[in-house]
Image (cartoon, grey):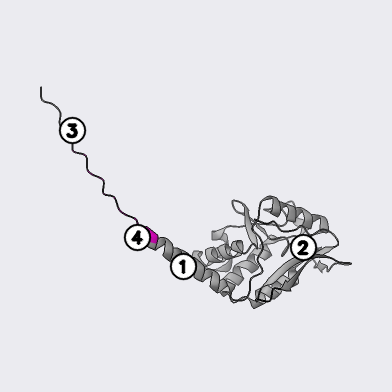
């Protein structure tokens, strides 16, 4: 799997159309940086605008959008609570049951959303109960922190990032359904071999 490029100081991720409704990502040199700042955190979010543009175009269930927003909110890049944070900065400590409660959604809805965002490379499982969201899309941090998070993603062979076109969620769902049907059809075609029952061994009479 091809790794994502590390975006170093003086560079940024850019997107251009591929002419087929999708986007091609690249890295280019820049003279300055766009800064994301708030009362709680400040730093570089290299592709925040692109991310929101994509989310605004995707024809996906509202439950998926809910799950993604909760994940980003849980990422918490604030340095003020380093000593009490459950997971390291840039990571999210949560699980399926926790997301169900936070989003008030069924297990199936949370599971499907999680699988989709992992499939398109927007998040990965760092370890049990800890997720890393794609640092090229979400994390606010200094340029040095960005390089660190990006290097962690690449060293873990995180999934390649996809910027999906608007109908991709529907296509992904249809492909999954087709795979399930094919697997079920293959299972039904398997020959069932009936094992011959062993006859009980009679003890020889004295």
Say whether marks 2 and 1 touch (CB < 8 Å).
Answer: no
Mark in the foreground, 2 or 3:
3
Q: Is residue 110 magenta?
A: no
Mark in the foreground, 3 or 1:
1
Considering only order in the chain, which callout, 1 or 3, is on the residue closer to the N terminus?
A: 1
Which numbered disc covers residue 188? 4
User: Going 54% across and 65% down the picture, which residue do you hit?
Assistant: 110
Say whether marks 1 and 4 touch (CB < 8 Å).
Answer: no
- Tell me if I can see residue 84 in this picture: no
* Pick the front one: 104 or 108: 108
Residue 205 spot, x, y in % from top left: 10, 25
- Quarter residue 158 falls in: bottom right
Considering only order in the chain, which callout, 1 or 2, is on the residue closer to the N terminus?
A: 2
Q: CA distance from mark 3 to mark 1?
A: 50 Å
Mark in the foreground, 4 or 2:
4
Q: CA distance from mark 2 to mark 1?
A: 39 Å
Which numbered disc covers residue 201? 3
Label 1 crowd bin: few (<14), some (14–19), many (20+), radius 10 Å: few
For residue 48, side relative to residue 95 (left or right): right
């Amino acid at each position: 799997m091809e790794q994502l490029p590390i975006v170093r100081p003086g560079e940024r991720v850019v997107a251009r159309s591929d002419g087929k409704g999708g986007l091609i990502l690249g890295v280019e040199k820049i003279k300055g940086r766009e800064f994301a700042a708030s009362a709680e955190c400040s730093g570089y979010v290299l592709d925040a605008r692109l991310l929101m543009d994509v989310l605004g175009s995707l024809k996906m269930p509202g439950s998926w959008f809910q799950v993604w927003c909760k994940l980003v909110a849980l990422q918490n890049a604030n340095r003020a609570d380093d000593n009490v944070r459950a997971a390291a900065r840039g990571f999210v400590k949560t699980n399926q049951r926790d997301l169900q409660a936070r989003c008030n959604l069924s297990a199936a809805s949370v599971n499907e959303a999680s699988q989709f965002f992992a499939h398109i490379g927007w998040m990965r499982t760092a370890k049990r109960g800890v997720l890393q969201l794609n640092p090229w899309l979400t994390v606010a941090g200094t340029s040095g922190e960005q390089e660190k998070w990006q290097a962690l993603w690449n060293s873990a062979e995180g999934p390649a990032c996809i910027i999906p076109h608007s109908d991709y969620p529907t296509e992904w769902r249809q492909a999954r359904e087709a795979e399930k049907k094919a697997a079920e059809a293959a299972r039904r075609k398997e020959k069932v071999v009936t094992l011959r029952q062993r006859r009980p061994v009679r003890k020889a009479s004295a």
